Image (cartoon, rainbow, N blue to C red):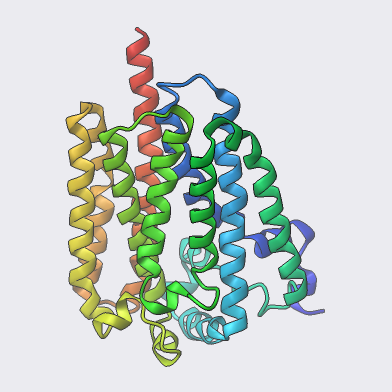
Amino acid sequence: MTEEERIGPLRRLNLIMRFSYTLPFVLASLCGVAYGLAYSDDYLIAALIPLTVWFLAMFVNFSNDYFDHVSGVDAEVEEERFSTMSESDVFKDNEMLKKIYWDGNQFERGLITAEQGRLVMAALVAASLLLALPIVLHGGILVIALGAAGLLLAYFYTAPPLNMGARGLGELNVGISFFMLVFFSNYVLSGVLSWEIALFAAAVAVAVGLMRVVDAMSGYESHLRHGEKDLAVRMGGREETVPVIKGLQAAFYALVAATALFHPLNLMLLLTLPLALRSWRTMDRKEELWYVRIAPQFFGVSMLTMLLYLIVLSARTFLTSL
């Protein structure tokens, strides 16, 4: 019996759908909704927005894996990441790294066929559209336009003919998508335009974009062979990318600090600084697989920033009610 045959049904479902990978998308949407609830009491729409985003996030991740399988990129990336990196103590003894760098493409592992994959993608899009109907009735043509834009960005991240991730637009695609998730989740719910949520959305866009940059660095050689122009390839190597990463992270903290102009409790978002500084030290030391070691820190900065903002908004609501 092969390893794949021994996998239980729930574990198999998680490996195929990658539910944990949808968490950043849902958290980003929840941040926008939580901000919007200060101006709206439409709790049905508030619940449906992140639920719809969850289904769209499953579609994003699944379609990316499908088209990476079709293009052959993931076959080589898997060899790079798992046959090489798994031999290192840095990787094999770190459960967080294993979770971040996943367990291989589900199509490559034979957990699902390409034909089944196309059916799953169609089902996810159909479920997203069904859930979005009340949101469309609430927000009108704007919701249709935003939903279409988000779906196209997600689909053409790896899908031909655009394949934005391979053409050096992957990080920009991710940044725009996450800005929209935060900013427009608030606007669709409440109809309120706010500089605070715009700044926070921009900060999330930079943080998650950096997650994408760091994640792609482990597959640098295969991306280079396939002509994929992610940031590391454009900069000419992993080490050459470090100054850009540091500059973007500095911009992220400048945006985070600027949100404190709207409420002093927003300074709590700076609690992620120790993680960022730790990643800088790792990049400077250039230890073995340094570009893998920093992945949990960048993941942590993104996720904790969104979680902290939800806590801050809850605290602000409580203080207002006193």
Q: Is residue 251 left or right of residue 88?
A: left
Residue 243: % across, % down:
17, 70
Residue 26: % across, % down:
51, 45
Q: Nearer the viewer, residue 177 or 262?
A: 177
Is 296 situated above or below 183?
A: below
Q: Residue furthest top?
A: 322
Q: Give the quarter of the figure containing the N terminus.
A: bottom right
How many labels sit on residues? 0
Residue occupying the point 38% across, 41% down: 183
Residue 211: % across, % down:
37, 62
Residue occupying the point 49% across, 83% down: 87
Residue occupying the point 38% across, 56% down: 176
Is 184 situated above or below 9?
A: above
Residue occupying the point 55% across, 65% down: 155
Examine the rendering and report whether any part of residue 7 can be seen.
yes
Q: Nearer the viewer, residue 243 or 159?
A: 159
Quadrant of the rendered image containing residue 66 = bottom right
Q: Give the quarter of the figure containing the C terminus.
A: top left
